[in-house]
Image: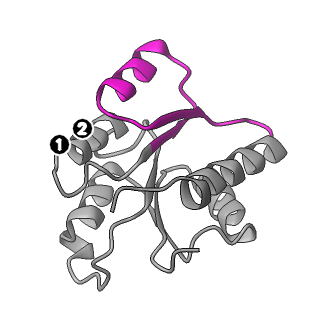
């Protein structure tokens, strides 16, 4: 596995964040997985500002798992800013949300989402879905570098 593999998890629900972190760690899919709880912090992490200004790593995440319903700044606005920045726009963004609403789905793809996944409610299904996402985006997918 790529030693620089990183996942940025943007998720405000503590239960969903814990389950995602557990699924990735159980499957040893990422050397480093960063979790932020709102859209503003996600952008601070990516642009190395605010509380993340001193972040040592120059490497960008290989994939961003992005919830839509976030405090401070919603996921669609975060996605818009990521895809409008030349340095960030090639990072795959997987929207992982509970929203099955057609307007959210359409807006996410129009803004450049690489995938849209509806969070399963059942524990085992959630863990399996997160594992499959990790396997695909970190092991099978070949990003532009």
Image side of residue 39 versus residue 35, left or right: left
In magenta stretch: residue 117: yes
Look at the numbered disc 1 and give the secondary structure of its residue: loop
Residue 84's tag is: 1
Which residue range is magenta in the image?
A: 94-122
Q: Is residue 61 above or below residue 143?
A: below
Image side of residue 112 versus residue 81, left or right: right
Residue 74 lies in quadrant: top left
Q: Residue at x 55, y 77 (%)?
A: 31
User: Where does the N terminus fall, quadrant-wise?
Assistant: bottom right
Residue 141: image location, x then y, percent: 53, 53
Residue 53 lies in quadrant: bottom left
Q: Nearer the viewer, residue 42 or 87?
A: 87
Residue 122: image location, x then y, percent: 80, 39
Q: Residue at x 29, y 30 (%)?
A: 111
Image side of residue 92 versus residue 82, left or right: right
Q: Residue at x 43, y 38 (%)?
A: 114
Residue furthest out toward the right: 124
Q: Which residue is mark 2?
A: 80
In magenta stretch: residue 142: no
Q: Nearer the viewer, residue 57 or 145?
A: 145
Q: Residues within 10 Å of mark 1 (few under 14, many from 20)?
A: few
Look at the numbered disc 2 and give the secondary structure of its residue: helix
Whether pointer 1 and pointer 2 mark residues with C-beta atoms closer than 8 Å, the reply is: yes
Q: Is residue 72 above or below residue 113?
A: below
Residue 49 lies in quadrant: bottom left
Q: Residues within 10 Å of mark 2 (few under 14, many from 20)?
A: some
User: Where does the C terminus fall, quadrant-wise?
Assistant: bottom left
Q: Residue at x 60, y 61 (%)?
A: 139
Image side of residue 59 versus residue 7, left or right: left
Q: Is residue 79 above or below residue 46?
A: above
């Amino acid at each position: 596995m790529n030693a620089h593999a990183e996942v940025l998890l943007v998720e405000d629900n503590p239960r969903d964040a814990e389950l995602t972190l557990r699924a990735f760690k159980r499957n040893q899919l990422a050397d480093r997985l960063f979790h932020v709880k709102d859209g503003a912090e996600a952008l601070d992490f990516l642009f190395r500002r605010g509380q993340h200004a001193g972040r040592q790593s120059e490497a960008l995440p290989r994939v961003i798992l992005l919830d839509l319903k976030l405090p401070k700044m919603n996921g669609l606005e975060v996605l818009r800013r990521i895809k409008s920045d030349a340095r960030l726009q090639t990072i795959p963004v997987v929207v992982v949300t509970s929203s099955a609403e057609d307007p959210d789905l359409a807006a996410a793809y129009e803004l450049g989402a690489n995938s849209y996944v509806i969070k399963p409610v059942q524990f085992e299904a959630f863990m399996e879905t997160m594992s499959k996402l990790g396997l695909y985006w970190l092991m099978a997918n070949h990003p532009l570098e």
